[in-house]
């Protein structure tokens, strides 16, 4: 449904140019959820903005690669061109629902605006569709809540409104960029289960972006781990947690705090991720890697198939004795 | 942990006046919290936004004025302290804040920020001693002493939080109140900072009130845990007791909602566990009764008090 091939995004010009996304490729099928996991600055949000065609002017630009939506190359199309050409069935929700909603417009009107653009409805049909969308995201008393302003809703309800607006375009692909990071855990759980339910019910492909491996474990089907602008490991969610192959993925898992930790020292990844523009040659993770070899600092990396549907961008992936 | 607590909080209440639709209303952010902190003990306070956990911390150091209650630090009444006693309290209890971007003055060098408390209180006898103390403190939080000359914008989030910790331990306090100190950090950096806090606690015998919304982080660092809901403690016990076998329905819900790194337990759709009620309208009886699967008629009328359980924990629930 969504296929991204060798996407490259850069910021700046000439000598000041820095690569933020350095050749990212993945595919997501109907009804499938892919988790894109990485720490701040790894390029995960930039990847999603590039897919949406939301690159700011005079800011970072797509320098290479193709983005295909249901088979059509939409890389060079602006969002409005996509809608006009009938390829507008992609939507995105963001981390902070309060800054994404207009505070002085009733939520009903904000949903209707999106429906009007995509479905061309008006009058009662428009109103009914807005109510239907609110019911779809399980907002109680949908008809009544259409007249509410964003500040009258809780954080979780606002995120539901954002999801309703996203669904207005009948998306084939939904991109969720840290949609629950600003929410409390109990609310987070409800939003995650809603997203999973919608994904299954509407047969949507979902790209779920997060810094938290724990959040994706119970939600997505496959995971791509990103580091310094590249995907370093891709696999099914089960394999990733059972047998992570890339040292960075293993490091991330080891340093997740656990309720059962009880005062034990935590494993850490020493140092910090490189800034765009200061990415070392060879493997970008080499300076922090516990099993680094001299060759890692010199040679370009190749993607290694660890198993069927599981690959890692590493010269020495951990396979626990299994042959590569 | 010795028997006499280093910090003792009794029946703390803090409220705020808020204007809504032209009417003055009162939000009781902290509604009768009692807790004590032993020497070099880490007490975790966990709860969702608006439960009052931050206000507890801020009321103790008097960044927010408490309405009533007693706070005793090393035998002194903190809430009434003035002059020399207040100064002593401010050196003895220090805070580490959540946002390492907002809590450092961008125009002051790291060294000046770290030495601020010492400067104000005349701790340093000479410039040489001041420089030496700054270098020593920066080293103990894992930063190169050369950072003293640098400014906050040159530092990463993790480094800034280390500075935030450095300025809280010069001169060495007895108690640190850490309000979500790792929430703004990436996981790999978060683990480094948690390890640092655990090391410092051991080395300097610090007692810590560790405030967080994240049960994972709380479980990692705390000896005892207090779970807060709408201004009150609803469950209070040893970390192991509470996190291995939560008893209050709210603690159970928090544990259930916590993301688990286990792909075999898929997220279940359609579960509605509700959201906290409005702060302006505290329900009668148990504040959790509206969301609680165990709630009975009694819960909607009678306020549950914290009571002792056979395993040493305290729980505020009629039905456990």
Image (cartoon, grey):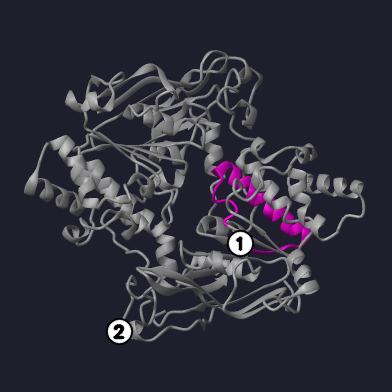
Between A175 and A33, the residue placed more toward the observer is A175
Q: Secondary structure at mark 2?
A: helix
Any part of residue B174 in sight: no
* Residue that sits furthest to the front in the current view: B22
Label 2, residues with CA under 10 Å away: few <14, some 14-19, many ≥20: few
Considering only order in the chain, which callout, 2 or 1, is on the residue closer to the N terminus? 1
User: What is the magenta range?
Assistant: B180-209
Mark sitting on residue A29: none
Work out whether B317 lies above or below A147: below
Question: Few, some or many C-alpha atoms within 10 Å of disc 1 (few <14, some 14-19, many ≥20)?
Answer: many
* Whole-percent x, y for residue B212 in the image: 54, 59
Residue B9 can be seen, yes or no: yes
Q: Measuring 72% from the left and 44% from the top, which residue is drawn there?
A: B108
Number of marks drawn:
2
Q: Position of residue B315 (x, y in %)?
A: 49, 78
Answer above or below: position of B22 versus A27: below
Question: Is the Cβ of the residue at disc 1 closer than 8 Å to that at disc 2?
Answer: no
Q: Which residue is tagged 2?
A: B297
Q: Residue A60 or B295: which is nearer the viewer?
A: A60
> Does dot 1 land on a helix, a strand or a loop?
strand
* Left or right relative to A127: residue A323: right
Residue A1, given in percent of the width and then of the height, sits at 24, 28
Residue A266: give x, y in percent of width and height. 62, 49
Residue at 24% x, 27% y is A80
> Is A83 contained in the magenta span?
no
Judging from the image, mark 1 belongs to the subunit labelled B
> Magenta stretch: dominant SS?
helix
Q: Is residue B195 magenta?
A: yes
> Left or right: B143 with respect to B128?
left
Q: Give the residue at mark 1.
A: B210
Q: Chain of mark 2?
A: B
């Amino acid at each position: 449904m969504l296929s991204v091939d060798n996407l490259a995004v850069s910021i700046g010009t000439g000598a000041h140019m820095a690569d933020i996304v350095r050749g990212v490729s993945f595919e997501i099928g109907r009804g499938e959820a892919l988790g894109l996991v990485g720490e701040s600055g790894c390029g995960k949000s930039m990847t999603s903005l590039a897919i949406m065609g939301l690159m700011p002017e005079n800011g970072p630009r797509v320098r290479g690669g193709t983005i295909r939506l249901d088979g059509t190359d939409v890389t060079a199309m602006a969002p409005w061109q996509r809608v006009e050409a009938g390829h507008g069935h992609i939507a995105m929700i963001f981390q902070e629902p309060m800054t994404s909603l207009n505070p002085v417009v009733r939520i009903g009107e904000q949903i209707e605006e999106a429906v009007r653009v995509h479905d061309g409805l008006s009058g009662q049909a428009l109103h009914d569709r807005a109510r239907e969308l609110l019911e779809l995201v399980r907002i109680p008393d949908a008809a009544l809540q259409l007249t509410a302003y964003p500040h009258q809703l809780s954080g979780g309800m606002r995120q539901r409104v954002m999801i309703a607006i996203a669904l207005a375009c009948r998306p084939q692909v939904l991109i969720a960029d840290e949609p629950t990071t600003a929410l409390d855990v109990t609310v987070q759980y409800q939003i995650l289960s809603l997203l999973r339910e919608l994904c299954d019910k509407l047969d949507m492909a979902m790209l779920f972006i997060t810094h938290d491996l724990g959040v994706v474990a119970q939600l997505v089907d496959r995971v791509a781990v990103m580091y310094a602008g590249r995907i370093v490991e891709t696999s099914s969610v089960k394999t990733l947690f059972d047998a992570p192959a890339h040292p960075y993925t293993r490091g991330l898992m080891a340093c997740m705090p656990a309720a059962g930790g009880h005062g034990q020292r935590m494993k850490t990844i020493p140092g910090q991720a490189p800034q765009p523009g200061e990415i070392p040659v060879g493997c970008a993770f080499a300076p922090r890697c516990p099993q680094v070899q001299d060759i890692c600092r010199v040679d370009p990396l190749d993607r290694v198939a660890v198993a069927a549907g599981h690959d890692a961008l590493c010269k020495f992936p951990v396979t626990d004795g299994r042959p590569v | 942990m010795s028997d006499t607590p280093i910090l003792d909080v009794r029946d703390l209440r803090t409220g705020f006046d808020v204007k809504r639709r032209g009417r003055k209303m009162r939000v009781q952010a902290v509604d009768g919290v009692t807790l004590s902190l032993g020497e070099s003990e880490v007490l975790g306070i966990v709860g969702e936004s608006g439960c009052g956990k931050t206000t507890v911390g801020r009321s103790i150091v008097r960044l927010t004025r408490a309405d009533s209650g007693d706070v005793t630090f090393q035998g002194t009444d903190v809430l009434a302290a003035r002059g020399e006693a207040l100064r002593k309290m401010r050196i003895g209890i220090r805070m580490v804040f959540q946002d390492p971007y907002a809590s450092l003055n961008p125009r002051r060098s790291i060294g000046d920020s770290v030495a601020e408390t010492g400067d104000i209180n005349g701790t340093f006898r000479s410039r040489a001693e001041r420089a030496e103390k700054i270098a020593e403190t920066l080293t103990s939080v894992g930063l190169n002493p050369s950072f003293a000359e640098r400014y906050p914008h040159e530092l990463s989030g993790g480094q800034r939080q280390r500075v935030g910790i450095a300025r809280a331990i010069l001169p060495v306090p007895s108690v640190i109140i850490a309000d979500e100190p790792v929430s703004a950090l990436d996981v790999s950096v978060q683990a480094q900072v948690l390890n640092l806090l655990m090391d410092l606690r051991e080395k300097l015998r610090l007692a810590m009130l560790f405030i967080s919304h994240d049960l994972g982080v709380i479980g990692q660092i705390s000896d005892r845990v207090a779970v807060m809901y709408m201004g009150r403690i609803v469950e209070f016990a040893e970390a192991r007791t509470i996190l291995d076998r939560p008893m209050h329905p709210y603690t159970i819900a928090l544990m259930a909602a916590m993301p688990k790194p286990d792909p075999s337990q898929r997220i279940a759709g359609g579960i509605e566990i509700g959201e906290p009620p409005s702060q302006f309208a505290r329900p009668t009886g148990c504040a959790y009764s509206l969301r609680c699967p165990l709630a009975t008629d009694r819960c909607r009328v009678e306020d549950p008090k914290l009571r002792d359980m056979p395993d040493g924990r305290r729980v505020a629930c009629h039905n456990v």
